[in-house]
Amino acid sequence: MKEVTTQDQKAHENASLSRRKFLNYAGAIAGAGILIASCKKEDDPKLVEEGAIDLGSNDTGLLNYAYLLQQLEAAFYIEVVKNPYSGMTDTEKGFFVAMRDHEIVHREFLKNYLGTSAIPPSIENDWSSIDFSSKNSVLAKAKFFEETVVAGLSGICKLLISEENIQVVSKMAVVDARHSAIVNNFVYPNTFAEKTDGNGMDVPQDPQSSLDITRQFFKKSISGANVPKY
Amino acid sequence: MKLTDILKEFEKVHPEAFEEKADRRHILRNLGFKAAKIVSPFAIAGITVNKAAAKTTDILAEAIIFLLNMGYLQSEFYKQALSVAGLIPESDKGAYQKILKDKNAQVAFWIFYLNKTNNVVPTKPSYDFTGKGAIPKAMSDYKTFLSLAHAIEDAAVRMYLTGIHMFLTNKAFRSDAMNMATANARHAAHVRFLRRNTGVDMMPWVTGTEANSLIGEIKKAYQNEDNTIQQKINTVGINGFDVSFNAATEAMDEPMTMADAEIFMRPFIV
């Protein structure tokens, strides 16, 4: 992973600004804003609840949140394939197996990419809200997870600083969007892009509100207190 | 209608464009570039036309024009297809109308920001989706149409990934491109799903360089899409998991360079 410290952020902003010469006055202000914000966070890390998993700060915190999301999706599809709902067709199984494998790639890639900064692997899930024997329950959750992950990764992408990190997260987000489209179609035909807005865009979600709706699927407490905010 | 009225109208339809976009507004004041010289769709690629002009352009405006040109092609593609009697089955028409609506909105979004910064908006070219005869049935046979449709959609997803990178230093535009990228990925998945329903063995995601691909330069849509090394990490069989080469290529889409995008789009421009 490209480590991003406050110093790196400063260097990165400055380098990009001077290189591209498209910012003058306004850019300097914007750059300074980012710098001040990040210094403040660095100097004053928020306390994390005892026993909670701390996602961390800066790009690391954002990538750890992406890793958490991919852990969730991979674990979900592994369970769906292992305990198929009654009446799962071979075609349906083929889709779930493929999506499972993509999510395993996303999860394991992020684990290796984050290296020693990664949160623990295989954080135990709470599946109490899912009935894996019911097609409706599984599809409803698949739809919810894919929509949440697409919006979550896009939200992360907006906040990331490092070029490499933005690139890898965006590459995964578009494939999760393909999943989301198709799962939507399984739930109800032709709903592949039902939530695009008036600009023909998906709507991203900031990591804080995203975490608020995903933490219920983990048995351990997860802290995003130091993850960058909108 | 006066400009202020247009803006008011736009704000009603797109309130989100006026929220939390401080850094985009700042950028826009500084976007000024010699657009008059680069209104040709491919001047921006800096390969075939006017290298000097390309060098003086701002990368953000370059990215907007790049994505706008893809949007033009996509919206015209579906507009034409929907107007050909008997091409698209009734049962699938709603989906294409929805896709066209999203493409038109994306085009309008980029035009709005070029206009807002007093930049010249590139003229929409005329298109021939037979690729000047290379795909004669592109607009008359549904199965052929579908194969071109997913190549265009998959290529667009890849171009948006490039766009995100070009917008690197501007959070707002970067986020816009990201949100259009995932919308395009949804369209791509659906078009591939429709093609699958005609009996073609394909999934909503791209496998390798796509054996079911098209002829000639149009294959550019999938060139280098079979990458499995991400930031020096090999994703085939990653960490001992049973991940096949195909699954590894499917799991991430790859950006398409502007040069390859030009080669892909050029055959369709009259």
Image (cartoon, helix red, strand yellow):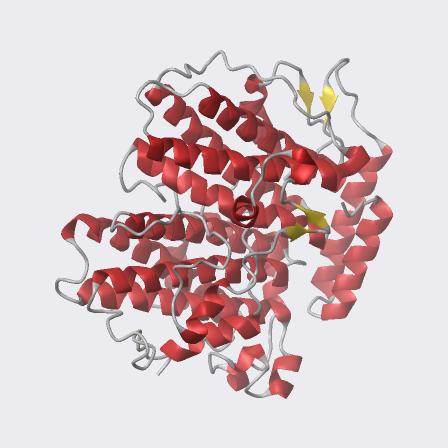
Q: Position of residue B54 (x, y in %)?
A: 61, 81
Quadrant hosting residue B68: bottom left
Q: Residue at x 35, y 43 (%)?
A: A192
Q: Nearer the viewer, residue A34 or A106?
A: A106
Q: Indicate left or right for A224 with A195 as reference.
A: right
Q: Quadrant of the N terminus of chain B?
A: bottom left
Q: Indicate left or right for B32 with A85 as reference.
A: right
Q: Indicate left or right for B169 with A7 as reference.
A: left
> Is A115 located above or below residue B107 in the figure?
above
Q: Residue at x 40, y 35 (%)?
A: A94
Q: Nearer the viewer, residue B76 or A81?
A: A81
Q: Quadrant of the C terminus of chain B?
A: bottom left
> Is B192 located above or below residue B256 in the figure?
above
Q: Position of residue B222 (x, y in %)?
A: 49, 62
> Is B88 located above or below residue A129 in the figure?
below
Q: Position of residue A19 (x, y in %)?
A: 76, 69
Give the tally of numbered discs: 0
Q: Residue at x 73, y 25 (%)?
A: A120
Q: Indicate left or right for A154 with A4 as reference.
A: left
Q: Position of residue B131 (x, y in %)?
A: 34, 77
> In this view of the protein, can residue A68 be seen by the observer?
yes
> In this view of the protein, can residue B124 be seen by the observer?
no
